[in-house]
Image (cartoon, rainbow, N blue to C red):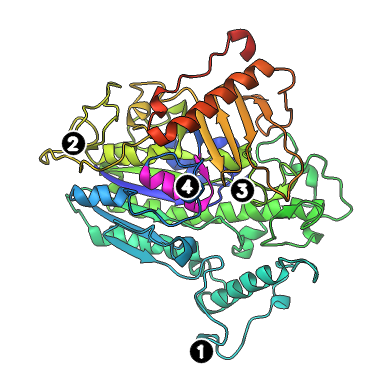
Amino acid sequence: MNVVVIACNGLHLGYLGTYGNPWIHTPNLDRLAAQGVVFDHHFLENATTIPTRRSWWTGRYSFPDPDKGWTAPLAEETMLGDLLRDQGVMSMLVTDNPFLRDPATGGWTRGFDEVRFIRGAGYDPFIPPGDPRLGGVEPKLKDEPGFRLPERDDPDRSLWKTRWEQFLRNRAVFNPERRPEGFPVARTVAAACQCLERLGPRPDPFLLWIDLFAPHGPWDAPEAFRDRYVTLDPEDFRADQEGDLVDDPSFDESPEEIRALIDVPAGWVGDVISDAELLRLRKTYAGAVAFLDHCLGRLFETLESTGRTEDSLILFTADQGEPLGEHDFVRRYLPWLHEELIHTPLILRLPGAAEAGRRVDALTQAVDLAPTILSALGIRPPGALDEDGEAAPKDATRSNSIGDADWDAPRSEIRDQVDPLHGKDLLPLARGRIHSVREFACMGMDAEEYAIRTRDWLLILPIDPDADGPPRPTQLYRKPEDRWERDNVAESHPEVVERLELTLRRFVAALPRDAVADVPAPRLNRDESE
């Protein structure tokens, strides 16, 4: 079995049809979901971009450790690519994510046999001022109505001016005519398709990791997509719909008259963006999601034409969501661990579309990707579950008991110095052989806020509140009824708060000892969950 991973950046779960959105057109992802297994309760472990890749590629929890946030991988950390290289499995990374090239957080491509960077996405510092490829014409911010700089006395004005000028230079060189095929996400998908075609009918197992920066801002898409969901009647988008727009869309302007911003600084609604502009921004974001889906259509066609849908696990996910005003701010302005940020998509399409249509309601997390990928490739790390839900022996081996039944490679051990993986193999869940891998999921952001999620509750625990935010109390929300966390019921359920916080703190304390498996689940009586 081979593995093809499609990882997106900043994809809001409420904007996908397979997760309940009724108005955004995503036929290619809908088809992947129909042919695959959809995980309904998949959560990040350590927000945001770089920390989540640490979760994906180490399979280990790190959210309480500030040295394992927006930092380069440590020498002692073993990456997924390292493990695959040691087992003779070819791994390839195709990406347009500029953070993976950032010198401050470099080293994240370690272990991959082949890496192909597609330049020019986001604020990628690629085309400098005065570059000859600009033809002597320096693009101006005033010529892009989708940008509005902060006020002159705003300390972040210079930062956003630099970012947006960089974006415009990149766009002027790579896609001056704004053709759909010239956008970074389309060019990255095209590079991935070339990789698949070059591999041909390769019999040896491989991992192809496609790391897309889309739909991370700036939300620049062809006009046909950017304006697809503009409507003269804001009531067409009701507040009770999934991916709802605004609670009370009562504006004097029609959406077509509202400025179509394609990027905004992180900040409060009413400060960096008005309520009316937020309505329009959400539609612009919806168009960016629809364009992402459109580009993925070519990738799925290539997977089919090269026969990889029959011999490969196709895994689709995202590193994080995208706050769009659900809690009165946009982007990741504050480390608040709410639904719109922490709940991410996960779809596994098994070879030959086995188990098509299955939905899994178990709690899963980003740390589960590494053991799942290893399992699919016939590599069983210590602590992994086999197809019957039994723990693997202490020595990590390649075998045919997990993954492709035709795998006949010799057994070999993963090197002894590898730290145990905290994540769980999700293939037994996908095949319906087990029904749970954990009773609770712990997570955090910037070591400033922690959260614990069970089937019935979400507890948010501020640890080191952000100075830019208001006072932040401990919060408790019923799940799944209160999807967007509107009603904090902490005061009326102090016993639930106490027991969830105790479990969360025990989990954090157990991480340095690699003893998270020994942390007992919170003891909640049935009456407390009703």
Q: Secondary structure at mark 4?
A: helix
Q: Nearer the viewer, residue 145 or 373?
A: 373
Tell me whether the residue at label 3 lies in contact with that at label 4, contact meaning CB atoms closer than 8 angstroms: no
Tell me whether the residue at label 2 lies in contact with that at label 4, contact meaning CB atoms closer than 8 angstroms: no
Q: Which mark is residue 132?
A: 1
- Mark 4 surroundings: few (<14), some (14-19) or many (≥20) residues within 10 A: many
Please name the residue that numbered disc 4 is placed on.
52
Measured from the top left, where is residue 72 in percent x and y?
43, 57
Horizontal side of 168 relative to 376 (left or right) equals: right
Tell me whether the residue at label 1 lies in contact with that at label 2, contact meaning CB atoms closer than 8 angstroms: no
Q: Mark 3 to mark 2: distance in Å?
A: 39 Å
**Of the image marks 3 and 4, the number of the one nearer the N terminus:** 4
Q: Nearer the viewer, residue 513 or 522?
A: 513
Magenta-drawn segment: 44-58
Looking at the image, is mark 1 or mark 2 nearer the viewer? 2
Q: Secondary structure at mark 1?
A: helix
Please name the residue that numbered disc 2 is placed on.
397
- Looking at the picture, which amino acid does disc 4 mark? Thr
Q: What predominant SS class does the magenta segment belong to?
A: helix
- Looking at the picture, which amino acid does disc 2 mark? Thr
